[in-house]
Amino acid sequence: MGIREDLTSLCAAFAEIHDLHAASSLLSWDQETCMPQKGLAGRAPALAALAGLCHEKLCAPRVGDLLERLAERTAAEDLSAEEAALVREARRDHERASKVPAAIVREVAEASSKALVAWQQARAASRFQDFAPHLSRLVSLKKRTAEALGYAETPYDALLDEFEPGVTTSFLQRLFLELRAELKPFVQEVLAARKVDAEPVRRRYEPARQIAFATEVARSMGFDFEAGRIDRAAHPFCSGIHRGDVRLTWRSSDDDLRPALFGVIHEAGHGLYEQGLPEAWARTPLGEASSYGIHESQSRLWENLVGRGRAFWKHFLPRLQDFFPGVAADLDVEAMYRAVNEVTPSFIRTEADELTYNLHIVLRFEIERDLFAGKLALEDLPEAWNNGTEALLGIRPGNDAQGLLQDIHWSMGSFGYFPSYTLGNLYAAQLFDAALSDIPDLEARIAQGDLLPLREWLREKVHARGRLLQARDLIRDVTGREPGMEAFLAQVRRKFGEIYGV
Ligand code: ZN
């Protein structure tokens, strides 16, 4: 068979896998937004069946044969750079999947679908013991997955590689140690300095209007509501079913503007990435995001570097006042800018400020690392979580809901995901510096509410390239520097130094 026919066959095989994933994503989205409570009995096996089918198609010997033939042609340089990248990424997916027995894949899908519901109930009741059996099952399934995948040093490496290809436990260990050493004393300095008043965001903003305002912000960011939608859910997330069907969710607080507003900006940042993925490579591995860390860089860039920036509020405070004339009329830009940048140790990661956020990730990294190295038993988890929170943030959770039950990730079996958030924060800082130098009037445009130049820049530099480049190469290519923490540290020192006078 000719090389063109092989490529066409490969794309057709992956299109089918993509379509099964799309169906599965839609079922998961539905489970979290509108499925009736009793629907789970049917949903868990349906999701497991789709996961099994995807896995079977991905591991098919025919796909292996196609990839082997095409890899030879890559070496002979018969393929374009994009086609070679497609073969490289398809091969990575095929090889990873082929190492894991189908039975484990189905068991993980079914166990996590059930665990998700158990987690929601356990969190509502704040009882870790109700979730523990599910967690125990998922941890043991993921340990078996890691053994099947293989690793250089420790089983956790195999799990990290799923989200951030090439990143290892020992690399993160060094990174987090350094980051913690830089951040902890700075956080303490900020906390000891004059207090920032968050009262402007802690008013009674009516939830339905909060979401109307947040939706206007998402629209200004360039999120296309003809290729997406937004619904209420217990946990904010973004589900990219296809570049033409991207779903965001939100939750709100009656007396705090931040969860809904910054939640929506965050998820819309993910959503822009999904909507901007390369059309020409849709339904192939190249039409996907580069890594989860790069995905988080998009959401965090919009949330923190735009939404928590002074320029943003120059335009959007008057708009907020239009939405809430009786609530926000007396506010000025400085008061709002300071309020949204309040630094305070908090229990809930998703609501943490820009400065303490990464300390929440350090805690999760250390716990997952120890759990998968067999150094931490499940029954000791609540204690380890609370001790870790106290050591890093100086506060101790009063119950499990404030502590180790707060995140959705473990119930989905997504061990190894958390570090993507910090990598995303670091990438975001570097990308934003690059955007500022490429678009000299960027801050002025943001201050006019014109967020599209930034979206266009991100679309060209990041979104439209899909998985063409791996995370590290992408950051180096766009910013001219290796990924690191310098840009992030410089930005937070500048911003919080000014706000807090330290
Ligand atoms: Zn995110």
Image: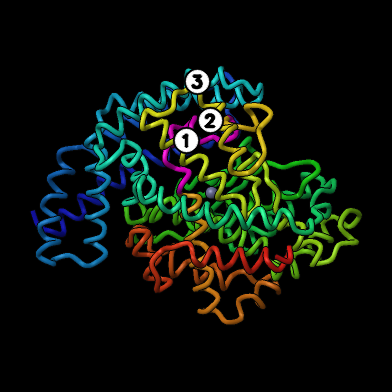
Task: Give the image location of residue 357, x and y in percent.
Answer: 59, 49
Q: Amino acid at mark 2?
A: Ala
**Residue drawn 22% across the image and 43% down it:** 95
Classify residue 262 as left or right of residue 157: right
Residue 367 is tagged as 1
Disc 3 designates what residue? Answer: 379
Q: Regarding mark 1 in the picture, which secondary structure is present there?
A: helix
Residue type at numbered disc 1: Ile
Q: Give neighbour class at mark 2: few <14, some 14-19, many 20+ (Cα, 10 Å).
A: some
Q: Nearer the viewer, residue 363 or 235?
A: 363
What x and y, as percent, mark residue 191?
71, 53
The answer to whether marks 2 and 1 mark residues whose Cβ atoms lie closer than 8 Å is yes
Q: Is residue 149 left or right of residue 449?
A: left
Disc on the earlier residue, 2 or 1? 1
* Residue tagged 2: 384
At a point 56% along the width and 27% down the height, the residue shown is 383
Q: Which residues are magenta?
A: 405-419
